Amino acid sequence: MKQLFGLLLFLFAGNLLFAQKKPLDHSVYDSWQSIGEKLVSNDGRYIVYSVNVQEGDGELLVQSPDLKYQFRIPRGYQARITDDSRYLVMKIRPLFRQTRDAKIKKKSPAEMPKDSLGILELGKDSLQKIADVKSYELPERGASWIAMHLYKAPVAPAAALDSTGRLQKLTSMADSLTRIADSIRNKVTEAKLKGLESLKTNKTGPSKGEDKIEEGTDLVVRNLVTGKEYRYALVSDYLFNKNGQVLVVETTGKNGGKESPLVLWQQLDRERPDTVMTKFNEAKGFAITEDGSRLAFVAERDSATKALKKYFKVWTYSPGRDSAVVWAERNSGPITNGLVISPEFKNYFSKDGSRLFFGLSADQPAKDTTLVDFETAKLDIWNYKDDYLQPQQLVQLNNDLRKSWLAEIESSNGRVMQLADDSCELVTPTAEGNARYALGTSSRGYRVQQQWALDGSVRLFVVDLEIGRRRLVAEKARSGSARISPAGNYITWYDSKKRHWMSYDITKSEAHEITNGITVPLFDEDDDHPDDPPAHGIAGWLENDEAVYVYDKYDIWQCDPSGRLAPVCITGNLGRRYKITLRYSSTNREDKFIRKGQPWLLQMFDHKTKGYGWEVFQPGKAFAYTDGKPVIREAVVSSAIKARDADVLVYNQQTPASNNVFATTLGNATRADAATQLSSINPQQSQYNWFSVELHNWKMFDGKMSEGLLYKPEDFDSSRKYPIILYFYERNADDRYNYIEPMPVRASINIAYYTSNGYLVFDPNIYYKTGRPGEDAYNSVVSAAKYLAKFKWVDSTKMGIQGHSWGGYQVSYLITRTNMFAAAEAGAPVSNMTSAYGGIRWGTGLSRQFQYERTQSRLGATLWEKPELYIKNSPLFRADKVKTPLLILHNDKDDAVPWYQGIEYFTALRRMGKPVWMINYNDELHGIIDRKNRKDWTKRMAQFFDHYLKDAPEPAWMGKGVPATRKGIDFGFGDPAEK
């Protein structure tokens, strides 16, 4: 009896614990934490990561893998660890409230609170701070130098005067006015005697229209070990070489002063810098060889300050020279026929310093300043012969004006070669610029068809960097798959028609189908767009270009780029056997290839459970799972990084209940129990009613099985009936173990908020066939709703649907086909495919035709070929069938779906007296960006669903509305009965 009583007491206490948990409300968002940047010291002794909040002050945490050392830096971000693993450097934001108060007071940029810099000697507990630092740099390798660029020092306010001081100031002002009056009287007397010509003066000083320059600010360069410092005034730019022996500094002149701008070369083992250049108007694009033996940059020193056109030259400097000398200039060598040196290109040397890569651009005509603005027509001219539509040209305008074509200078002899032009726009060197050959690509001849195909078709070239010539490798390749091998011996691409990977042997000028013999698909066999499916991709290259590793859906294949050897599945088809996708995870961002004998970290994804795990593979040995079978976690593991010089592995792990950073070793990566949890964010989450998630399978109307995710409240009670919202886009079931952070939403529902407040949420996968996207959504979503309605704890009379963009279209269509939903929200929906087909995606300037013919809308035909498909799949043409209350979100600056699509649907439904509302956030894009608008939308959408699915009172904005005369005054959140 006592045992039974104890059990009942335990169960009661458990239920009471759930009952005591609070529902999430809209006030919790700002302080909710997430993991940001993450890095590990080269020696593996220290791990650094940031914990950010949505609005407020985050922090930077430093920990040892064993947690014996911990240090917190409030508001720290943009962290870097020195190459010797001794120091951590980071920027430190001002307090959020200080910045907020300054914005409220409308302070000028100069008066706003500024960032500081923090320097921490790792393992110690003392943080050094330097105020007012706008940027900093560390050398990538080498000694522990840091350069700190400071903000301009604020002008100190004048000291307050006492009463005696104020009297003296007034007396001085009176004396000054007396002297001015006497001077005027003397001038008048002189004019009477000599005439008015005597009043003319010779002006000196700056001319009336002379512009002030933007003065540089102080730069402090310090050795973190020895404390040695260099200081420079009026600095505008600075750069270390990779190995940290040299610093280049550019300074400006001073307004009203005699200082000239300078480029300085500072050997960091010497006291004084060398002057590289003086008396120039502008210098930029600094590049230094890794060993610090040469500098290159572009500069302009011959034009007038206000010249409409300025021509830059390439300059070079080496230690021991008196100053920089010209290396390349306009009208010399290949820089002719309307070409000029680009000041916008980021110049760089090859790794060995044998080549400088710089940019050439077209010599754009100067604007005609004689034209009167108010008398000049403003228009766009659309021409059917243009490569790109006018809207796309306008979106790309700034980039096109700064566009550069790659050129090179040979360091040994100064020979200049143009490598790219309009017939081969992009040239990509390899081996960090050391290799003889590069990959060239061109979209010329394929640009117009991107209006409806958007397949990225390009020609591929091999470009010889020694002689500047190129030869054609392939036509109609898809640009996203084309690569040149790390050592520069091969070019590879995926042939979407043959559905195989191709390799071009550069030295032999031979192409090979290197995946011939692989019988499983190398393309995404689940892709259901009316286009050639994309390849699964490439894992990487073996050292010295000896092999390339290709993915199928599950496994990894070693392929011979020369085409001599047959492909080998190095994972032994064990991915396919267990329905596990195996993917190589590079743990070092600097690696350009996979080293021989290097153990591989593989990320595993289980298609059955949707869980993830790690596996370690040693090339040269037969692949086998560590425990004889895949060890899959009920979690997502990702973003692994490894210490360069130690066996320390750091990764992120998220579950529906947590999102944290973990540390382990490569050898123990498979074992979850061997990892150390470093972070523990959002402790307040335990106070709130959270959620659980289940994977469900059901039979759709077409007889095929589907899967989806059911989210339940943590305090779920099977004896209750719950309202349910079906949210969908395409296929999200693979996201089963994702952490969902409560936040004000960009567009779609926040699942954590709704489940915490007593809703169920279901996210069904949708499967498509060509020509019937609306009915395919019906097949998936409505069958899911009928499946869910069979559960006794689902209130089938309180079912809602919600989706944004493509999901918004599907919502709009579904309510024309069924009345089983009590409420629907459609964000940025296409309602009329006939008008949307010819529209523009204003964010890119692209025509929307490709979307219907080849991609997401999946109609597979033009409007004039099959107009019936466009009409049949358009909600607008069935608007009279709608009975479900509908809330539309469509913003007036939507850059993806034309705003008028929402208006067409709203006005049709309004005309027929259907319950419909449309929210438009002024100047917002396809999804809401501004946080205050996100908060507003999150509340309104919750009020809408609460009203229809939980019988909550109708808010005023839904009831009586908010007229334009009350815009910005009355937001309509209250009861409509309230005045």
Image (tube, helix red, strand yellow):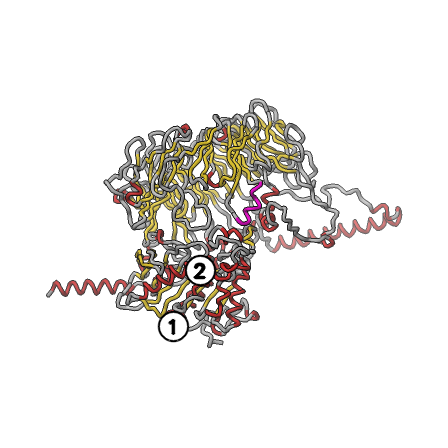
The residue at which mark 1 appears reads as 951
Other-residue count near label 1 (Cα within 10 Å), few / some / many at <14 / 14–19 / ≥20: few
Viewer-nearest of labels 2 and 1? 2
The residue at which mark 2 appears reads as 774
Where residue 914 sits: x, y (%)?
Answer: 48, 72
Q: Answer with left or right where residue 94 lies relative to residue 69.
A: right
Q: Total of numbered circles in the picture?
A: 2
Residue range corresponding to the magenta coloring: 445-452
Residue 819 appears in the figure: yes
- For residue 322: magenta? no
Where residue 674 sits: x, y (%)?
Answer: 26, 42
Between residue 216 and residue 822, name the one nearer to us.
Answer: 822
In the image, residue 802 above or below residue 444: below
**SS at circle 1:** loop
- For residue 451: magenta? yes
Other-residue count near label 2 (Cα within 10 Å), few / some / many at <14 / 14–19 / ≥20: many
**SS at circle 2:** helix
Residue 250 appears in the figure: no
Where residue 37 sits: x, y (%)?
Answer: 41, 45
Going 37% across and 30% down the picture, which residue do you hit? 595
At label 2, the amino acid type is Gly
At label 1, the amino acid type is Asp
